[in-house]
Structures are given as structure tokens and as C-alpha cells.
Amino acid sequence: QLAPPHVMSTLSGLSNTIVDERTAKRADQAATQGHYSRACRILHATPIADANAENLATLRGLHPAGGLPTDASAPPCTLVVTEAHVKRVIHQFPRGAAAGPSGWSADLLTQLIACTGAQVAHDLVPVMQALIGGGLDIETRTAFFSARLIALMKPDARIRPIACGETFRRLAGKILLRHLRQSAASTLIARRQ
């Protein structure tokens, strides 16, 4: 299967680029799965910083650990999450979107929903409802609101921290934003923002 023309032009521009074996394998795997744009991003990606004490200290300075989440004083959300919400919103994630600390990606959830019919979407409803409704204990909130931190090297050799949030929390956020989209737009327009 040939890649789309814009991808082929990007790939042809790599002829003088030196790519390490690990990167080449990752790009090949992405292209084999039909993720051509992701394969190109992998080949052009900023390198990941070495895992050492100095880089870890730099990362901690740039992205300090936050305190434990506290109980929110906002009124509870009245949205009742349904399987339809989950199915509709899961497809809004870009293909190949990074997974959070659990390793569960939106692609994996999409495939599970496709394979099991409505069962996985049905099973995700109470999880999404708890995340949106705020009815989680502090340990569970800490797990769902965590992120995987990656250190990329900038061209000037400085470190750029990238946080990949937990997919389940991101899914709940997308469901909630979709629900609030119209009222938020009306409020912002009324305030001329």
C-alpha cells in the first residue's frame, strides 16, 4: 500500500537524513499500520533526552510535581453520560494519540469498542460519570489526573518537557466540553470574549 502523495514527498526529503535503527523500526511499524503522518513525525521527531540525573533534575525544575488534588467547590455536573457520548467522542482523538501513564490509548479503546460492540462503551459510562461528576476519592483522582512526562531535546540542547495525560481523563474532558460547548459559546459571546 503506497502512502499518500504528501507523505511520499516528505519521505523522499529524508534521503540524506540519518535515522537510528530504533526510530526506523518505529516509523516502519506506524506506516505498516497505515499511520503515514505519524511515521513521518517519528522520522522528523525531536530526540528524547537521555535518562540521567542531570536531565531528571532539569525536568523537575521545569515541571514540578503538583500537590494532591483537592475537593472542588464547583457545583456538581448534571450531565448523564451515555454509551453514545463515549462512542461519539472517542473518535475525536487523532489516530496515534499518545497514551497516558496507564498505557491505554484512544486507539486501543476505539478498537475494543469496535470488537465488543457496545460492551466496552457501556463499561466506560460509570468511569466517565465518576470523572465528570467528581465522585472519586483522592487516590483515584491522583491516578486519573496524572501524566506521563517525556523530556525532548530542543535544537539548542535544552530540555522540553511534554506531558501525556491519562486517556480516560481526556475522554471525560472531551465528553464534558461537548456537552458544555453551546452554553460556553453563548457565555463567551455575551461577554465579548
Image (tube, helix red, strand yellow):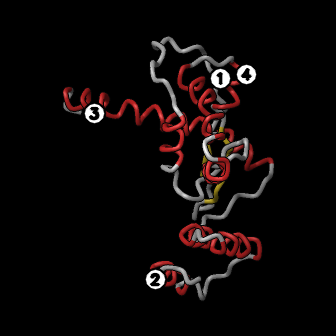
Q: How many marks?
A: 4
x and y, in percent, of residue 117 in the image:
62, 47
Residue tagged 2:
5
Residue in the image at 60% along x and 52% along y: 160
Left or right, 34 with respect to 142, comes to left
Label located before the other in sequence (3 or 4): 4
Contact, mark 3 vs mark 1 (Cβ under 8 Å) = no
Q: Which mark is residue 157?
A: none
Which of 4 and 151 lies nearest the eye of the viewer? 4
Whole-number angstrom distance, CA of label 1 to CA of label 4:
12 Å
Secondary structure at numbered mark 2:
helix
Q: Which amino acid does label 1 sit on?
A: Gly
Camera-near label (1 vs 2) is: 2
Which of 54 and 181 lies nearest the eye of the viewer? 181
Residue tagged 1:
67
Label located before the other in sequence (1 or 4): 1
Q: Residue 139 carries which label?
A: 4
Residue tagged 3:
185
Camera-near label (3 vs 1) is: 3
The quarter holding residue 141 reads top right
Secondary structure at numbered mark 1:
loop
